Image (cartoon, rainbow, N blue to C red):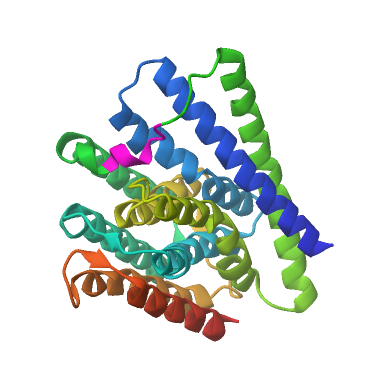
């Protein structure tokens, strides 16, 4: 029964995220908002919506380990699982913005998260404000100096939608995300109790893989179609949003802490996130600069499987 709740929750999250994205982009185009602004704000927040809703709902329900584990696990899954599998389908060229801004900002955000948690095991409201402010500064920088880096994130072939359809998709998307998060959290916490494992283990494995499925599907489709719709920068951008927006906003609403059961987040999981995030930089330059191929994909997948083995 718990597995059915989790699967049902994931399906609703994926559908809800897609509906929200469709309505948000259509509304932005109808309001004549520039595509660059859509790419960096509307699209980025919409694609991070599953993680955001799950984390807020989990934190408010008193399941902080689920909120933190979801974000840390999703970041590991985005680079280890999603990027790893995507590279098996084709070589990925890397933009210079990767090492100039994207990767450094991701590492700063990751270290900031570790720094905030390692002191007192909790992300306070003030720390959440600092994280979200850092995101706003990063977005302003991108909009001013790196406009081309985010244009690819905006769907090109979306037909204009009538206002009633935009409203319908917006409502369906919101309901799908909220209902999906309710089912997912209920199923995940019950499954943890049933198998005698911590909420944190369920969060960094089952829940995080589930909320990374949209990125995985989009990445594989883009590579197969030989489109530039997904790039390493976009996946790294997702990781930045997960930390600074998802955990930032969640901790502003209610402080997010690590419980006694979730200590593995600080002794194991966060170091895997830092390690896999760091290793992407040398992989891009070795042996040939500015590209990733199937060998790098295999290495990332091995790292992800090793993380799962050590964790579970």
Q: Position of residue 97 (x, y in %)?
A: 18, 52
- Viewer-nearest residue: 129 or 45: 45
- Viewer-nearest residue: 220 or 205: 220
Residue 11 as seen in the image, left or right of residue 138: right
* Residue at (64% x, 23% y) in the render: 168
Tell whether position 250 is magenta: no
Residue at the extreme right: 1
- Viewer-nearest residue: 154 or 40: 154
* Residue at (46% x, 49% y) in the render: 246
Q: Quadrant of the C terminus?
A: bottom right
Q: Position of residue 221 (x, y in %)?
A: 47, 51
* Residue at (56% x, 39% y) in the render: 18
Q: Is residue 40 above or below residue 311?
A: above
Q: Position of residue 160 (x, y in %)?
A: 48, 19
- Viewer-nearest residue: 266 or 69: 69
* Residue at (75% x, 68% y) in the render: 191
Residue 120 sits in quarter: bottom left
Residue 133 as seen in the image, left or right of residue 286: right
Tell whether position 152 is magenta: yes
Residue 92 as seen in the image, left or right of residue 255: left
Query: Is residue 214 visible to us here?
Result: yes
Query: Is residue 127 visible to us here?
Result: no
Residue 169 sits in quarter: top right
Q: Give the residues in magenta.
A: 150-156
Q: Position of residue 279 (x, y in %)?
A: 29, 75
Q: Quadrant of the N terminus?
A: bottom right
């Amino acid at each position: 029964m718990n597995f059915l709740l989790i699967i049902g929750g994931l399906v609703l999250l994926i559908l809800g995220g897609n509906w929200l994205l469709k309505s948000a982009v259509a509304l932005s185009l109808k309001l004549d908002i520039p595509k660059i602004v859509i790419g960096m704000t509307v699209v980025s927040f919409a694609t991070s919506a599953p993680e955001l809703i799950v984390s807020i709902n989990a934190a408010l329900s008193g399941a902080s380990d689920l909120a933190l584990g979801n974000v840390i696990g999703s970041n590991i899954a985005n680079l280890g699982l999603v990027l790893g599998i995507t590279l098996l389908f084709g070589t990925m060229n890397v933009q210079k913005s990767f090492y100039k801004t994207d990767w450094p900002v991701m590492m700063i955000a990751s270290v900031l998260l570790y720094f905030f948690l390692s002191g007192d095991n909790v992300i306070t409201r003030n720390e959440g404000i600092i994280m979200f402010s850092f995101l706003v500064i990063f977005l302003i920088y991108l909009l001013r100096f790196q406009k081309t880096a985010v244009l690819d994130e905006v769907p090109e072939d979306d037909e204009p939608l009538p206002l009633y359809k935009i409203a319908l998709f917006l409502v369906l998307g919101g309901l799908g995300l909220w209902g999906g998060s309710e089912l997912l959290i209920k199923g995940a916490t019950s499954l943890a109790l049933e198998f005698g494992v911590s909420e944190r283990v369920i969060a960094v494995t089952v829940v995080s893989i589930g909320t990374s499925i949209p990125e995985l599907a989009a990445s594989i489709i883009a590579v197969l179609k030989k489109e530039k719709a997904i790039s390493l920068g976009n996946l790294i951008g997702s990781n930045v949003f997960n930390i600074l927006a998802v955990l930032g906003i969640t901790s502003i609403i209610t402080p997010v802490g690590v419980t006694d059961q979730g200590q593995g987040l600080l002794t194991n999981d966060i170091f895997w996130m830092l390690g896999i995030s760091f290793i992407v930089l040398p992989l891009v330059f070795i042996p040939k600069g500015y590209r990733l191929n199937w060998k790098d994909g295999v290495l990332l997948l091995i790292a992800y499987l090793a993380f799962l083995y050590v964790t579970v």
